[in-house]
Image: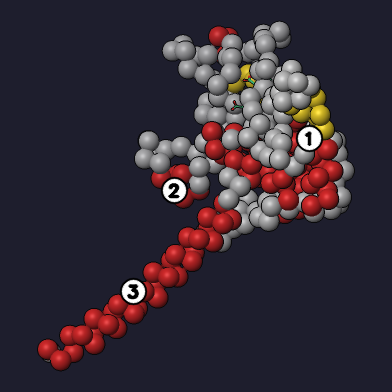
Amino acid sequence: GSEAHVEDFDFSFEGPFGSYDTNQLQRGLQIYTEVCSSCHGLKFVAFRTLHDEGGPHLPEDQMRAYAEYYEVFDEALFDGEGDFRTATPADHFPESNDPNAPDLSLMAKARAGFHGPYGTGINQLTRGMGGPEYIASLLNGYHEAPSCAPEDFDGYYNTTFAAGGYPDECKGDHGEHLYPGSWIAMAPPLYDDQLEFNDGHAADVEHMAQDVAAFLMWTAEPKMMARKQAGLTGVIFLTVLSVLLYLTNKRLWAPHK
Ligand code: HEM
């Protein structure tokens, strides 16, 4: 079929009891830093949040050292003319370097991996919105272009990316796409054993794609753990309240039965 392909990865943060895997978020941060950040930005993410519990949870000194590795432009410096200075934990990650590369802060919520069936949204109810699945699939989605495509067609063939260019030669009689996905401007950013992780985790494309997707889920939804915790507390509270109200009701009406 020609539907874009999104694989349903199992992420640790799925489900009502799911939580971010600290090691995975730290690996994702490393991949983001060493690979993605050469083009993409994370302008809505403050360095200090890298220390937050429920997030990558870097030790405070490491978070500070991480921030200091960046330079930011401070408009207040140099008598209002602005100047560069070393970043502090209160500063944000820089914006995208490459004007064509979108900011990734909220990307995991801006894209949906699962749709339908037939506009009902049932797939999203059972499997989630699929933002991180979309990102992980995209990074795993580079394949050799189908032979119908002209050699010099712009971009890289990706079976997950649906919004890119598509050669006429690969369309059917009614303009329908004969192959999944489309052509994306981003070259495949990951390759096997590109990096080494402190925790000794595998560094193949399939795993790194999931690690960086998990990290980008955290940047988009940093309070997910607190939200799930509050929801669970609420459910327990309401359950206890229901029992008490039931017993109260029984007792109040007992004399009239
Ligand atoms: C687009 C992720 C590395 C350049 C994107 C998109 C994502 C993404 C999620 C959006 C796709 C969409 O619109 O649905 C990543 C990740 C990276 C990475 C996680 C690191 C592992 C890079 C690098 C470059 C780059 C190193 C530059 C050399 C671009 C460009 C686009 C893009 C130009 C726009 C593509 C288009 O609209 O055709 N990236 N990226 N990315 N990325 Fe990356």
Residue at image mark 3: 242
- The answer to the question of whether label 3 and label 2 lie on touching residues, with beta carbons closer than 8 A, is no
- Which one is in front, 221 or 174? 221
Q: CA distance from mark 2 to mark 1?
A: 41 Å
Does mark 3's beta carbon lie closer than 8 Å to ligand 1?
no
**Image x and y of residue 223, in percent:** 58, 50
Q: Residues within 10 Å of mark 2 (few under 14, many from 20)?
A: few
- The answer to the question of whether label 2 and label 1 lie on touching residues, with beta carbons closer than 8 A, is no
**Image x and y of residue 55, in percent:** 68, 51
- Which one is in front, 142 or 41? 41
Residue depicted at 74% across the width and 17% down the height: 81
Which tag, 3 or 2, sits closer to the chain's start? 2
Which tag, 3 or 1, sits closer to the chain's start? 1
Quadrant of image for the C terminus = bottom left
Numbered circle sitting on residue 125: 2
Residue at image mark 1: 87
Disc 3 residue type?
Ser
Residue depicted at 67% across the width and 33% down the height: 42
Does mark 1's beta carbon lie closer than 8 Å to ligand 1?
no
Residue depicted at 46% across the width and 50% down the height: 126
Instruction: Report the image quarter containing ligand 1.
Output: top right
Q: Residues within 10 Å of mark 1 (few under 14, many from 20)?
A: many
**Is 247 placed left or right of 85 in the picture?**
left
**Image x and y of residue 199, in percent:** 84, 53
Residue 134 image-quadrant placement = top right
Q: CA distance from mark 3 to mark 1?
A: 51 Å
Q: Could one spot residue 62 in this view of the protein?
A: yes
**Image x and y of residue 192, in percent:** 82, 37
